């Protein structure tokens, strides 16, 4: 057991990694409807990976996976099928914190990746005892809390961004937003 005085200095959720079959519609909803700024874009193999600011150093991110199925359910209700969830990412304050956490995981007998350099974040990946995929990154270049610079390739590395990001870069707004509908006629209160 590692002494409590050496516990990581967590700084919120770096990003929640979710999945979408349509990044353009996702940008239009999260930026155009909810007002979240697109703060970084990249590619992870064949998938786009876009980050939306929800607070200082805190984002929600989406992987675009062509042909992935989606489903809807009322909020707070148990799912009727398996939920899609990619991984949960806990933010660290700096590289020292990342290296210390990696060593802490290894010392505890937990498998952990080497540090992965994504350009604007550096991360390690591991799982919890339930098999939930986890990431611990630090912002090597903080994309949040500042005006978006769509020409900065460090943060906007997708060379073929969806139309909504092009519109944000050119006009500061999206040309249209998708309509949504509630699922079901009952809202479950989980409290």
Image: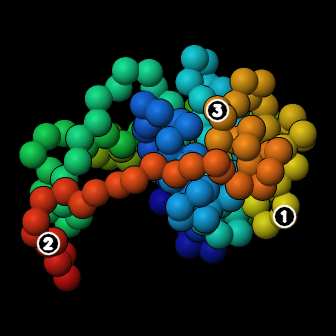
Look at the image and name its color scheme.
Answer: rainbow
Q: Could you tell me which residue is drawn at 44 percent across and 21 percent down?
A: 66
Cα distance in 3D space between marks 3 and 2:
35 Å
Near mark 2 (Cα within 10 A), the count class, few <14, some 14-19 or many ≥20, is few
Give the labeled residue for mark 1. Answer: 146
Residue 61 position in % (x across, y down): 56, 47
* Among numbered discs 1 and 2, the one appearing first in the sequence: 1
Q: Could you tell me which residue is drawn at 48 percent across and 59 percent down?
A: 1
Q: Which image quadrant for residue 86?
A: top left
Give the labeled residue for mark 3. Answer: 162
Q: Could you tell me which residue is drawn at 59 percent across and 57 percent down?
A: 32
Q: Could you tell me which residue is drawn at 54 percent across and 55 percent down?
A: 30
Q: Is residue 7 visible?
A: no
Q: Which image quadrant for residue 170?
A: top right
Viewer-nearest residue: 57 or 1: 57
Give the labeled residue for mark 2. Answer: 188
Residue 162 is left or right of residue 167, and the answer is left
- Residue 188, above or below 24: below
Cα distance in 3D space between marks 1 and 3:
22 Å
């Amino acid at each position: 057991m590692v002494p409590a005085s050496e516990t990581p200095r967590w700084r919120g959720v770096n990003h929640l990694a979710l999945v979408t079959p349509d990044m353009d519609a996702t940008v239009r909803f999260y930026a155009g409807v909810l007002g979240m700024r697109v703060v970084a874009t990249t590619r992870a193999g064949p998938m786009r990976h876009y980050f939306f600011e929800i607070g200082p150093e805190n984002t929600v991110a989406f992987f675009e996976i062509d042909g992935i199925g989606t489903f809807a359910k009322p909020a707070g209700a148990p799912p009727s099928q398996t939920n899609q969830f990619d991984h949960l990412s806990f933010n660290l304050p700096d590289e020292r914190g990342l290296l210390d956490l990696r060593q802490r995981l290894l010392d505890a007998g937990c498998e952990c990746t080497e540090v992965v350099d994504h350009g604007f974040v550096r991360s390690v990946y591991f799982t919890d005892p339930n098999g939930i995929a986890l990431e611990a990154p630090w912002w090597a270049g903080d994309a949040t809390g500042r005006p978006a610079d769509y020409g900065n390739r460090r943060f906007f590395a997708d060379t073929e961004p969806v139309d909504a990001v092009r519109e944000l870069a050119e006009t500061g707004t999206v040309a249209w937003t998708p309509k949504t509908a509630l699922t079901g006629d009952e809202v479950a209160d989980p409290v």
